[in-house]
Image (cartoon, helix red, strand yellow):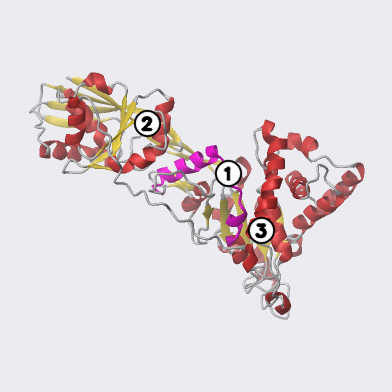
C-alpha cells in the first residue's frame, strides 16, 4: 500500500514543503529510506521502527520504502521522525489516508513513542497557513509557539498512540497547556540617569537611536562607553507587529523563543564576545542557522573592544550593514537570513587605551597604527556617528543634580520616529538611516549655502558618496529631534562633527 504525508523544513527563514511517501510491498523484509538525507534523518529509521514496535504496531515482513521528496533538497533535522511514522502507519492501514491530505506533520519521536519538541515551529506553521493547510500535527511542548499563528487548526500531541486514537476517533480534544504560562516580569532597564557626565555622548546615543544610525564610541578605559551602550535598549522604540513576528521567527529557528506563549516583545540587544568566530557572527555551520547579526535583527548589535575582534570577522559586517540581510551559500543550498540591525561599537584608541595622551600612553606610533588598522576604512565608512568619550572629570562624577532619565529621552526619540514614519511611510522605510540615495534630494534637501559648505567639506575630507549621504541622513535625524522640517545649519554642523571625530585617530 502507498501513503503520502506533508511536512516542511526551514531554509533560512523560508519554509520548503517536503512530501514523505511510504510504500509497503512484497519483497525482502527491509526498511529503506531515500531522498538526499542527512545522518540524523537516516537515523530516524531506527527511532521509528523501535517506537512503532514498542507501541504495539507490528511491522510486517515486507519491503518498506520511505521517500522524502523533492530529491534535490537536503533533508536535515529531527522533525522528520513523526511524518515518517505517520506515513508508514497510513501505508499499513492503521490511519486513514484521506484525512492526511490537508495535514502537516512535524515532530521528533523517542524510542518509547513520545513526541518530542523541535525548533522552527513558528515559521513553518505560518507558512502552512499561507498555503491552505487545514491542520498541523505538532509536539505538545511546541503548542504555545504554534498557537501564536491564528486561523489554523493545531493538534498538539504527546505520543504516537494518542495521535492514532485521535484519527480513529475522528476528533482531537484540545488540552489546556501544561506549558509554562507564567507572566514574565520585565527586568528594570539600566537608566541614563545613573550616568554622570558624558553629555555629548548621551546626545550622540539619542541621535543614533532616533534614526537607527550605526554608532561608534572611542575613548580610554573607564570613560563609560560600555555603560552607555547597555542603556541604549531603554530608549529604543517598541517593535511593530510585523517586526515582532520577523524576530520571533529567527529565535524560533534557534530554539530561543520565550516559553510563555508570546512573540518577542523587546528589541534584541546582542553583545557577542570578541572571540566569536566568523560563523558565529554571520551564521552557518553544518546545519546552517542564524548568527549574531540575525539575532540582532531589528535591534542592536553591540561590539565592545572593536579592534579585538578578528579583522576577517569584522569584514563580514560590511555587506549586511548595507543590505539588511545575509545570504549563506552552502553545498546544500542558499540560506537567506535578515540582518537589519543597528551597530553600536566601542573601542580604546590604542592597546593601552590612552592615545593620544602621551603623558599616559606607552604605545609606539607603529603599535597605535597597527591597533587602529584592525578596523578597516570601508567598515568605518559605514558608521554614521563617531563620538569621543573622554575621561569623566571629578566634578562631573560627583555632581548631585538629577540627570535626564531614559524615559524622557525615549519620548523625544518616539516623537522623531513618528515624524520619520509620516514622511517616509510611502517609501516603505521607517528610519532616516534607510533613505535611498535617489530620495536624498527629496528628504534631505539643503540650501544653497549649505551645498557650498558641503562641497568644500567633501573635497577637504575626501568623503566617499556613502559618507556624504550619511552626514545628510544624520542631519535629517537631528532636525527631526528638533521638530524642524528643514535641515538648518546647526543640524548640519552637528552631523559633520559626528563624522570627523574618527579622523583624529585614523588620519
Q: Residues within 10 Å of mark 1 (few under 14, many from 20)?
A: many
Looking at the image, residue 124 lies above or below residue 111: above
Q: Residue furthest bottom?
A: 359
Q: Residue furthest right?
A: 449
| Residue at horizontal 56 percent and vertical 53 percent from the top | 301
Range covered by the magenta-colored residues: 230-256
Give the camera-side residue of 164 and 276.
Answer: 164
Q: Residues within 10 Å of mark 3 (few under 14, many from 20)?
A: many
Can residue 332 be seen?
no
Identify residue for label 3: 216
**Which quarter of the image is occupied by the C terminus?**
bottom right
Identify residue for label 1: 340
Identify residue for label 2: 73
**Which quarter of the image is occupied by the N terminus?**
top left
Q: Are marks 3 and 2 in contact (CB under 8 Å)?
A: no
Q: Residues within 10 Å of mark 2 (few under 14, many from 20)?
A: some
Distance from Cα at disc 3 to Cα at disc 2? 42 Å
Looking at the image, residue 495 lies above or below residue 41: below
Give the camera-side residue of 329 and 337.
Answer: 337
Give the percent coordinates (x, y) of residue 482.
Answer: 78, 50
Q: Is label 3 or label 2 in front?
A: 3
Give the percent coordinates (x, y) of residue 297.
Answer: 54, 46
Distance from Cα at disc 2 to Cα at disc 1? 28 Å
Give the camera-side residue of 399 and 251.
Answer: 399
Magenta highlight on residue 267: no
Distance from Cα at disc 3 to Cα at disc 1? 17 Å
Mark 3 or mark 1: whose residue is earlier in sequence: 3
Amino acid at each position: 500500500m502507498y501513503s503520502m504525508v506533508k511536512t516542511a523544513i526551514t531554509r533560512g527563514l523560508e519554509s520548503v514543503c517536503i512530501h514523505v511517501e511510504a510504500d509497503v510491498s512484497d519483497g525482502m523484509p527491509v526498511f529503506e529510506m531515500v531522498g538526499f538525507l542527512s545522518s540524523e534523518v537516516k537515523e530516524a529509521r531506527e527511532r521509528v521502527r523501535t517506537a512503532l514496535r514498542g507501541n504495539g504496531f507490528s511491522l510486517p515482513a515486507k519491503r518498506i520504502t520511505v521517500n522524502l521528496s523533492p530529491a534535490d533538497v537536503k533533508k536535515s533535522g529531527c522533525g522528520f521522525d513523526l511524518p515518517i511514522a505517520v506515513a508508514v502507519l497510513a501505508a499499513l492501514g492503521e490511519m486513514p489516508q484521506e484525512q492526511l491530505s490537508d495535514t502537516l506533520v512535524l515532530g521528533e519521536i523517542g524510542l518509547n513513542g513520545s513526541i518530542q519538541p523541535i525548533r522552527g515551529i513558528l515559521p513553518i506553521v505560518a507558512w502552512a497557513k499561507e498555503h491552505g493547510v487545514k491542520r498541523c500535527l505538532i509536539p505538545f511542548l511546541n503548542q504555545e509557539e504554534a498557537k501564536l499563528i491564528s486561523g489554523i487548526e493545531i493538534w498538539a500531541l504527546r505520543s504516537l498512540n494518542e495521535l492514532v486514537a485521535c484519527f480513529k476517533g475522528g476528533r482531537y480534544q484540545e488540552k489546556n497547556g501544561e506549558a509554562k504560562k507564567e507572566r514574565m516580569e520585565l527586568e528594570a532597564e539600566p537608566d541614563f540617569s545613573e550616568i554622570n557626565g558624558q553629555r555629548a555622548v548621551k546626545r550622540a546615543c539619542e541621535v543614533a537611536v532616533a534614526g537607527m544610525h550605526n554608532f561608534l564610541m572611542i575613548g580610554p578605559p573607564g570613560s563609560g562607553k560600555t555603560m552607555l551602550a547597555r542603556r541604549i535598549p531603554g530608549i529604543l522604540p517598541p517593535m511593530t507587529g510585523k517586526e515582532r513576528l520577523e524576530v520571533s521567527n529567527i529565535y524560533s529557528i534557534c530554539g530561543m523563543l520565550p516559553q510563555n506563549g508570546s512573540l518577542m516583545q523587546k528589541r534584541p540587544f546582542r553583545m557577542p564576545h570578541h572571540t566569536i568566530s566568523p560563523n558565529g557572527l554571520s551564521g552557518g555551520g553544518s546545519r546552517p542557522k542564524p548568527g549574531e547579526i540575525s539575532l540582532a535583527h531589528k535591534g542592536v548589535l553591540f561590539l565592545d573592544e572593536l579592534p579585538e575582534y578578528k579583522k576577517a570577522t569584522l569584514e563580514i559586517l560590511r555587506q549586511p550593514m548595507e543590505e539588511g540581510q545575509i545570504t549563506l551559500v552552502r553545498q546544500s543550498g542558499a540560506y537567506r537570513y535578515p540582518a537589519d540591525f543597528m551597530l553600536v561599537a566601542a573601542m580604546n584608541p590604542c592597546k593601552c587605551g590612552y592615545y593620544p595622551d602621551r603623558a599616559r600612553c606607552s604605545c609606539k606610533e607603529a603599535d597605535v597604527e597597527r591597533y587602529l588598522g584592525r578596523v578597516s576604512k570601508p567598515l568605518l565608512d559605514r558608521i554614521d556617528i563617531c563620538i569621543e568619550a573622554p575621561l569623566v572629570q571629578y566634578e562631573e562624577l560627583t555632581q548631585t543634580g538629577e540627570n535626564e532619565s531614559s524615559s524622557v529621552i525615549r519620548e523625544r526619540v518616539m516623537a522623531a520616529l513618528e515624524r520619520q514614519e509620516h514622511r517616509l511611510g510611502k517609501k516603505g522605510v521607517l528610519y532616516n538611516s534607510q533613505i535611498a540615495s535617489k530620495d536624498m534630494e527629496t528628504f534631505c534637501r539643503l540650501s544653497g549655502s549649505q551645498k557650498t559648505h558641503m562641497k568644500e567639506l567633501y573635497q577637504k575630507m575626501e568623503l566617499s558618496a556613502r559618507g556624504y549621504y550619511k552626514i545628510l541622513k544624520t542631519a535629517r535625524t537631528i532636525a527631526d529631534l528638533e521638530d524642524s522640517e528643514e535641515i538648518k545649519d546647526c543640524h548640519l554642523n552637528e552631523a559633520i562633527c559626528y563624522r570627523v571625530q574618527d579622523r583624529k585617530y585614523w588620519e
